[in-house]
Image (spheres, coloured by chain):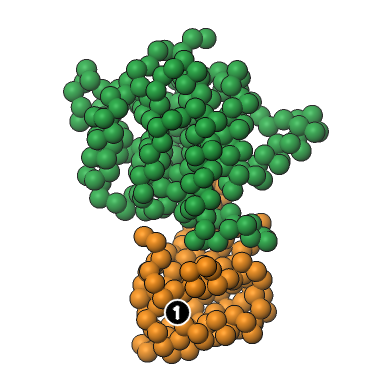
Chain colours: A green, B orange
Amino acid sequence: MTLEQQRHILVVFPHPDDEAFSSAGLIRLYRNMGVPVTYACLTLGEMGRNLGNPPFATRESLPEIRRKELEEACKAMGIEDLRMMGFRDKTIEFEDNEKMVQLVRNLIDECNPSLIITFLPGYAVHPDHDATGRAVVEAVRRMDRNARPTVYGVGFANNTIAEKGEPDVVIDIMSVKEDKLKALQAHASQTAWMIEENQKRIDEGQPMSDSWFHYEKFYTINVDE
Amino acid sequence: MKEVDVNELQQLINSFANKDVYIHLETTNGSYATHYNEQFFNASAFLRNAKIQYEHGKVVGESPHRVGLKMEHGWVYAQGITHYELDEHGRLLMAGLNYEGKLAIALQISETPFSY
Ligand SMILES: [Zn+2]
């Protein structure tokens, strides 16, 4: 399988770890091909609930921990252009819609991406995810048809496949699964339990399903729909 | 944060009484609650940097504890507090961590605003 060549990839997600779960393999594959990747991460996941018991963090110390995790994950994925946009977790949908569209528009103007990766609006479960996807779709919709980048959306709501069918983009990431694992491990405050669970399953001869480390799947978004 | 020591926490709550203070109050089930259980009715509340004054406050009960702050014209309370600390900025951070280590409630008091 050969990946379509890209000029520049813009990744727009609201939370540190969104990129690792959904796209770390794809990003690493493109970085290995030398394609520049810009990642705009809107928040620092300040509202993350996992503080541990006994706790390893407080509500106030979590953002700094997650900032460092995000930087570490970007190293594993080879992302050299990380933008932390300074919004607050769980507030994206309450921001001024126009401001969010402009923010995406400015990133597009600056990076001139041929591909944008974000969430599939309406099928991304978390309100921040949906709001992020909506802003990206609207920013691209306003562009001249022939100047528009391709937009890949990540959808994982329970009703996604029933309503949207199977994702049309399926990327085999087996060759970079170690890098994806490293990116996920970097987000330790969010993924430690999961990695532990996976290790247990590997020990029992039943590693986590292929869905995590074999394929990454996306919906090509038709912004005019 | 450490587990609630009622006497020590009570003294810390007392130390912020009758001063202008900023409050962070949050309850949460997480944004994925309905994703994992469609029958789950997901409700939560979040308030950060409301400026209040309380005339007295109290920590009550066995863990998880209740904490109530009596204001001139009303109340603030939180149920389910298990842990607390006075952080390096002199802010009183109280939290309720469930059995899986996930935050269920937070009540925080500071003389200076919390970051955005
Ligand atoms: Zn997320």
**As displayed, is residue A144 above or below residue B58?**
above
Specify few, some or many for label 1: CA neighbours under 10 Å numbering under 14, 14-19, or 20 or more.
some
**How many marks on residues?**
1
Residue at point 61% right, 19% down? Answer: A174
Residue at point 55% right, 30% down? Answer: A76
Dot 1 beta carbon under 8 Å from ligand 1: no
Closer to us: A160 or A207:
A207
Amino acid at the residue labelled 1: Val
Closer to us: A59 or A160:
A59
Residue at point 52% right, 68% down? Answer: B88
Q: In which quarter of the image is residue B7?
A: bottom right
Q: Quadrant of the C terminus of chain A?
A: top left
**As displayed, is residue B64 above or below residue A41?**
below
Residue B95 seen in the figure: yes
Letter of the chain that mark 1 sits on in the rendering: B
Q: Which residue lies furthest to the top in this view?
A: A1
Q: Name the residue under label 1.
A: B76
Q: Mark 1 falls on what kind of element?
A: strand
Residue B74 seen in the figure: no
**As displayed, is residue B21 above or below residue A166?**
below
Residue at point 55% right, 81% down? Answer: B12
